[in-house]
Image: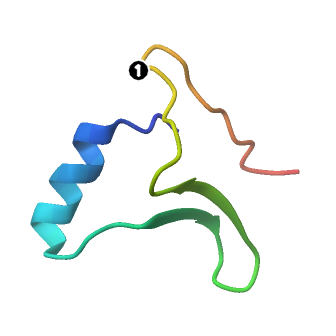
Amino acid sequence: MNLELGKIKDQEKVRGVEIKTIYYGTPKDKILIWEKGMDLPKARNRIYIPLSL
């Protein structure tokens, strides 16, 4: 997953709400990926999350 601030801002405009957090997983079993105020990795750095453990 590659998070970029521009894409978050685009999604806020499309959805009409401010995005404060991004989670990966199900509503009952989720991992915090990003929270407003956190530094984002540069675009060339990527966070890889395995789809199966």
Crowding at dot 1, Cα within 10 Å, few <14 / some 14-19 / many 20+, comes out as few
Q: Give the left or right position of residue 11, taking residue 44 as reference.
A: left
Q: Quadrant of residue 19?
A: bottom left
Residue depicted at x 21% and y 51%: 9
Residue depicted at x 47% and y 51%: 37
Q: Secondary structure at mark 1?
A: loop
Return the x and y of residue 32 as percentages of the image width and height. 65, 61
Extreme residue in the bottom direction: 28
Q: Amino acid at mark 1?
A: Ala
Q: Measured along the vertical axis of the image, is residue 14 above or below residue 33? A: below
Q: How many marks?
A: 1
Residue depicted at x 51% and y 27%: 41
Residue depicted at x 75% and y 42%: 50
Q: Quadrant of residue 31?
A: bottom right
Q: Quadrant of residue 18?
A: bottom left
Give the residue pinned by disc 1. Answer: 43
Return the x and y of residue 8 as percentages of the image width and height. 29, 51
Q: Give the left or right position of residue 6, taking residue 21 as reference.
A: left
Return the x and y of residue 2 as percentages of the image width and height. 47, 34
